[in-house]
Each structure stands twice: as structure tokens, then as C-alpha cells.
Image (cartoon, helix red, strand yellow):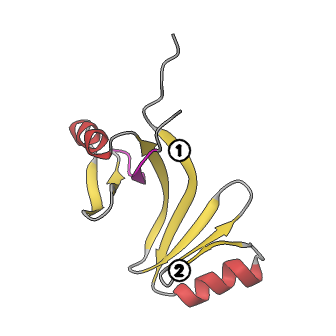
Amino acid sequence: MAVKRKFRSSRDIIIRTNGWAEATNFYGSVLGLPVAHRSETLMGFETGAFCLYVEKGKKHGPVFEFLVPDVQAAKRKLIAAGCTVVEENASSPRCYIRDPYGLVFNLGKARAEK
């Protein structure tokens, strides 16, 4: 019987910066990465191996993402294992977690497997 993975990574990495216009210009013009997503506060660039999202806001280091079937259950499991919640938005099913070794990642909702 195959074991289903509960955590799997997405292809998304996000950075947040107060210098959003400068950052999006750098990734789009200097590096020449094609735009994959555009909104007023978020721009995504396709790199080939991953999609780099640049978000307006308070600066933080790069964050990658794990997708899980149940964000709240995964969050409880991780907190019990020594992780801490860095940021959470009640309006969307996701949260930033710092593991006991200092790595920060986003927990996002996985699409149902068919």
C-alpha cells in the first residue's frame, strides 16, 4: 500500500519588501524573468524551477511553501513538535511557521488529489 505524503512542497517562494517597485523591476528587467502573476501587492516571476513572488510589505527573508490537506491540523502537529507561528491570516487558510531549526515556511491548503 502506498503511503500518502502529508506535506509536499509547492513551486512557490515568496519575499516581502518595502522596495516593491525596485524589486519587481530588478526581477523583471535586470534578470528578465517573465511575469506569471500580477496584482497591486503581489507579482510572480517564473524562473523555470520555481515561481518567485514579490509582495509589498514589511521585509522578511525568503519563504517557501508546504501544502497540506488540513492547515489547522498540520499547524497543531508542528506546534506540538516545537514550531512557532510567525504570521497568520484568518481570512485565508495559511500561516507562516518557524521550525525549531530556524527555517520559516508557509503552510498552504493542498488541492484534493483525484
Which span is picked out in magenta?
Answer: 100-110
> Does the segment drawn in magenta span residue 107?
yes
Q: Image height check: is 43 above or below 83?
A: below
Residue under the point 71% across and 80% down:
28
Classify mark 2: residues with Cα within 10 Å, few (<14), some (14-19) or many (20+): few
**Label 1: few (<14), some (14–19) or many (≥20) C-alpha neighbours in 10 Å:** some
Q: Label 1: which residue? A: 9
Q: Who's the residue at 48% across and 52% down the image?
A: 65
Residue at point 23% right, 41% down?
A: 76
Q: Which residue is mark 2?
A: 39
Q: Position of residue 7 (x, y in %)?
A: 45, 37
**Residue that protrudes farthest toward the top in the picture:** 1
Which residue sits at x=38%, y=46%?
101
Q: Please, is residue 61 above or below residue 112 in the view?
A: below
In which image quadrant can residue 35 be found?
A: bottom right
Q: Is residue 5 above or below residue 69?
A: above
Tell me the SS state at disc 1: strand
Q: For this view, does 56 lie left or right of residue 27?
A: left
